[in-house]
C-alpha cells in the first residue's frame, strides 16, 4: 500500500485550484469534466479537491465542511518551502489567513500555518534535515 492523494472537499473546485496556483505556485494536473473534481501537480502524491455535492455522493454521508467551521479542521496539508515567511506573505496576499507566523521549532524546522479561503489548513514549513 502507498499514499496516493489527499482530497479536500470544497464549495468551488475551480476557486480552490486557482487559489493554490496563485498562493503556492502549484500547477493543475487534472480537472474532471463538469469541474466537480480537480488535482494539482505535487509530485507522487496528488492534492485534489472535490465539490461538496460530488464528495457527499461518493461518501454517502454528510461531513463538516472546512469553510463552514469557525475553527480549522483537525487535518492539515503540509507544503515545504525554502522561504517560509515569503511563502506565508504570498499566501496571505492571495486571501489566506495567517494563523501562526513562522516559528523555528526545537528540532530546527521553520513552521507556519495559514487557512485558505476554502477553509483548508496549510502548514508551510522547511524540509526536515
Image: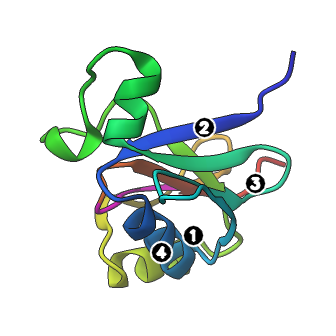
Q: Position of residue 27 (x, y in %)?
A: 68, 73
Residue topped by disc 2: 6
Q: Nearer the viewer, mark 3 or mark 2?
A: 2
Distance between mark 4 and mark 2 Cα atoms: 17 Å
- The front one of 35 and 15 is 35
Q: Nearer the viewer, mark 4 or mark 1?
A: 4
Residue density around tag 3, few if under 14, some if 14–19, many if 20 or more, within 10 Å: few
115 inside magenta stretch? yes
Distance between mark 4 and mark 1 Cα atoms: 21 Å
Residue topped by disc 3: 127
Distance between mark 1 and mark 2 Cα atoms: 22 Å
Distance between mark 3 and mark 1 Cα atoms: 10 Å
If the image is split into quadrants, where does the N terminus sit?
top right
- Asked whether disc 3 touches disc 2, contact meaning CB atoms under 8 Å apart, the reply is no
Q: Position of residue 68 (x, y in %)?
A: 15, 42
- Checking the image for residue 18, the label placed there is 4
- Asked whether disc 1 touches disc 2, contact meaning CB atoms under 8 Å apart, the reply is no
Q: Earlier in the sequence, mark 1 or mark 2?
A: 2
Q: Nearer the viewer, mark 1 or mark 2?
A: 2
Distance between mark 3 and mark 2 Cα atoms: 20 Å
Residue range corresponding to the magenta coloring: 111-117
- The main secondary structure of the magenta stretch is strand
Q: Residue at x 44, y 72 (%)?
A: 19
Helix, strand or loop under label 3:
loop
Amino acid at each position: 500500500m502507498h499514499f496516493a492523494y489527499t482530497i479536500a472537499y470544497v464549495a468551488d473546485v475551480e476557486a480552490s485550484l486557482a487559489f493554490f496556483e496563485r498562493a503556492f505556485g502549484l500547477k493543475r494536473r487534472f480537472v474532471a469534466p463538469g469541474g466537480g473534481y480537480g488535482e494539482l501537480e505535487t509530485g507522487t502524491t496528488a492534492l485534489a479537491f472535490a465539490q461538496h455535492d460530488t464528495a457527499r455522493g461518493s461518501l454517502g454521508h454528510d461531513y463538516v465542511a472546512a469553510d463552514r467551521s469557525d475553527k480549522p479542521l483537525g487535518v492539515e496539508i503540509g507544503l515545504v518551502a525554502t522561504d517560509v515567511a515569503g511563502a506565508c506573505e504570498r499566501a496571505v496576499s492571495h486571501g489566506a489567513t495567517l494563523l501562526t507566523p513562522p516559528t523555528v521549532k526545537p528540532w530546527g524546522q521553520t513552521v507556519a500555518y495559514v487557512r485558505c479561503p476554502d477553509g483548508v489548513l496549510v502548514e508551510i514549513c522547511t524540509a526536515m534535515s
